[in-house]
Image (spheres, rainbow, N blue to C red):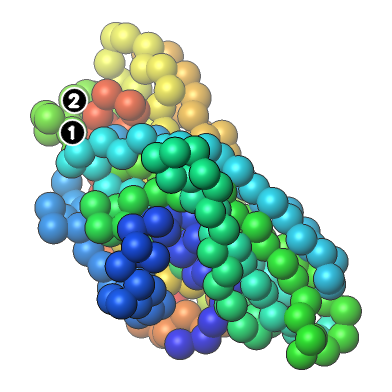
Amino acid sequence: MKKTIAILVMFVMLGSISVFAVSSQGIPTFEDLLSYQPPGGTSGCTNSRLLYEDSGVLDIGGRAYRVWGQIPVNQGCNYRVEACGTTIGEGHGDVLLWIVFQDEEDTIIRIPVDVGEVRGTECASFYWNVQQYGMPIGVEISWGGGDAVGTPSLQYNFKIYEECSCSLPTLYPKVDIEQFSVAGGSTIIRDGKILSSFEIAPGVQQTFIQVENRGFFTQNEAMIKFEGLPNGVSVNITPETQKIKAHNLGTYSATFTVDPNVPSGTYQVTLVSYSERGVFDKIIFEFVVP
């Protein structure tokens, strides 16, 4: 598997001192990171909360130091990372990371990790085995290396989410996914019913989602998300949250980015509307990469 900044920044976000305390077991491979599935599963009702996000651009030879501090781990919750990285300009470079930890005596520990060559664009989303590896407090990213070719910049972004299971099924049966359509194109969902699959070629595609509040109470902090997207596909949703008054619609813009390396195929993806208190509605549709 290619060593890419997307996957490696995600690895850094969710590493642990315990990994190095048992160095004889070795650092997990990229295949380990991507293939891990939480023992309790990831389907069903979940409340998702953004814990940390960051982005930036590094010129060749540059460094970035990011500290997010201690992130408490809640038992029974899963931790998911979405990240993308892109080289800008001709050429390629190497990434060296220092994973930053803080031990029980408040001593700062920096562990170097040689990422290797990075070029092009890579995106990934996966769950981390936080029970085994815990959480670091920050990371330093170095871009360039002695084997760099040209003077490309490195653009990166990442988000860490906490996903906790809901104690109840769908809370608001009258808050429904109304429509999901491609900007200037086809409609995938209308009136809560699937009309077609969502076919998307590598590149960027903007879509719109509408959620209708058919009830009598305002729903605060209404959100949407897509579950089950293949590796190499990312989505940016705006607004992240909004208030939907009774008998009104909330409209979201979802911009998908599909990497050229995403395998062709048909994927089962779930569109979920929800709030911090639980899930409103969910619809499974076919996500097709030609």
Mark 2 is on which residue type? Leu
Which structural element holds mark 1? loop
Residue at image position (47%, 80%) is: 262
Q: Are marks 1 and 2 in contact (CB under 8 Å)?
A: yes
Q: Quadrant of the C terminus?
A: bottom left
Residue 117 image point, x, y percent: 65, 85
* Residue toward you, 130 or 202: 130
If you read the primary sequence from the N terminus, does the residue marked by circle 1 or circle 2 appear first? 1
Residue 99 image point, x, y percent: 54, 59
Image position of 252 (left or right of 80): right
Residue at image position (37%, 12%) is: 218
Q: Which residue is mark 1?
A: 166
Image position of 47 (left or right of 179): left
Q: Residues within 10 Å of mark 1 (few under 14, many from 20)?
A: some
Q: Which residue is mark 2?
A: 171
Question: Which corner quadrant of the image does residue 147 belong to?
Answer: bottom right
